[in-house]
Image (tube, grey):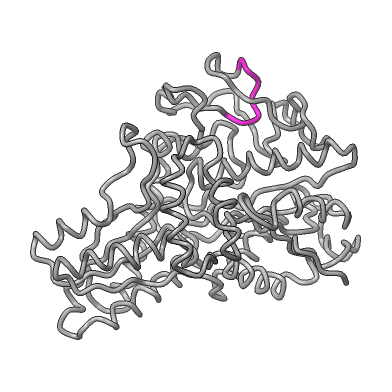
Amino acid sequence: MRQSSAGTRGPVERGERTAGAGRPGEAEIDAVLLVTFGGPDEPADVLPFLRNVTRGRGVPEERIAQVAEHYHQLGGRSPINDQSRELLAALRDELAPLPVYWGNRNWRPYLRDALAEMRADGVRLAACFIPSVFSTYSGCRQYRENLAEALDELGAAGEPAPAFVKLRVFFNHPGFLEPMADRVQAALETLPADRRDGAHLVFVAHSVPRWQAVESGPAGGAYERQLLAASRTVARLLAERRGREQPWDVAYCSRSGSPRVPWLEPDVGDCLERLAAEGAESVVIVPIGFVSDHMEVIQDLDREALARAGKLGLTAARAGTVGADPRFVQMIVELVEERRDPSRPRRALGELGSFPDVCPLDCCGSPATEDRRPAMAGLPEDALGRGRYRRGAAERGGPATAGGPGHSEDGRRVWRTGILDEELPDARPGRPDRR
């Protein structure tokens, strides 16, 4: 079988990857697509990559050069691609003979390249895994918009394109939380024995603009709720193992953009300042919002947060991320099987329960105007009666080219955003004012 940069394992063999398909509600998935952020592989890639990331955002050149230096300190190579390749290899081993492809938002292999390979191999319906822990625009919907754009480009060639279903958000799946608890325990054990029991856990996620947090999830506010739930569960799992509870807090890192736009706080450095002032002696920084040790973890936590802790007199350690832990890989396999067979049990820890597979189209809205009204990808301009909206991809079951609304069997309107089964319900009670 031929191998490609986009990650194909060879042409799809019809019949061998859809065993059992055809029962009511079961998806005939014949491939999996791993969708990641991407990163430079060598020094010459750094500036082109960063310009891809910042395109259209008005980021000054001096800021881009400053961030580029962070990559050059690592030899001009981001660790994220190697970590994605490790996860890709593990998924291929576990899912064989189901083919697994890989596409990036911002660097090679690009999503459009992966989709072209999938089309050439005859893929009809793929499950899409986005390794973002929590629901938010930049961690979920933006990837779906990127996928819709890549499908539009592919559809312009006039040939059939693959269709996609999305795997659910995994913030409270035991395959993610249990490995995280292991890594927190391992970090605790690196502290001096007399500073372990009182060590304060600081669970860290990527900060996002406040509007993203408000808009996140089907009913709004999901990002912070999911972060708190995941952190609480890891702290509980650790307490069950150690026989004692650790004090803990939630903080954020990687804030960027205009200082006039409110972002989630506190910053992890400010959190460390407060803990030191309150008399804490030791901390474990837990990157609960990240699945791999990529550049933001290295720069914001390993370089900056740990250095700040040292200046404050705090004994500090940073917990690892799940990476390609076998339990995390098995979790992804399990999520694929959930989409193939909706009757399967859906595992989740904590109080929030498993997240739904199908996202409403106005889930995790994005800013269309300066007043932060959401640009809900895939809706017509008059959807909900306000705002400017970008028309999405084709109707359910149709080719992946620009088009109008489709209708499901029970009459609900369905629009494509690169994902086959996203839908817009007629009403969503309890949604906060989106303005």
Which one is in front, 99 or 71?
71
Residue 320 located left or right of residue 12: left
**How far from the left and from the top, in percent, is residue 77?**
54, 66
Left or right, 9 with reference to 268: right
> Residue 256 occupies which quadrant of the picture?
top left
Residue 328 % position (x, y): 55, 69
* Position in image of residue 106 (x %, y %): 61, 50
Nearer to me, 40 or 139: 40
> Please, is residue 257 above or below residue 115 in the view?
above
> Can residue 353 be found in the magenta stretch?
no
- Does the rendering let one see residue 349? no
Residue 229 spot, x, y in % from top left? 37, 54
The residue sitting at 74% across, 31% down in the picture is 408
Q: Is residue 74 left or right of residue 252?
A: right
Q: Reply above or below: 300 against 162.
A: below
- Name the one closer to the observer, 404 or 150: 150
- Magenta-tinted stretch: 376-382
Question: Viewer-proximal residue, 127 or 64?
Answer: 64
Quadrant, the C terminus: top left
Tell me which secondary structure the magenta stretch mostly adopts.
loop
Q: Can you see residue 4?
A: yes
Instruction: Give the number of callouts.
Output: 0
Q: In the figure, 401 relative to 75: above or below?
A: above
Residue 148 falls in image quadrant: top right
Residue at the image point whose x is 83% and y is 63% from the top: 17
Residue drawn 25% across and 48% down? 266
**Where is the N terminus found, in terms of image quarters?**
bottom right
Residue 308 against residue 190 in the figure, above or below:
above
Direction from residue 407 to residue 223 in the image, left or right = left
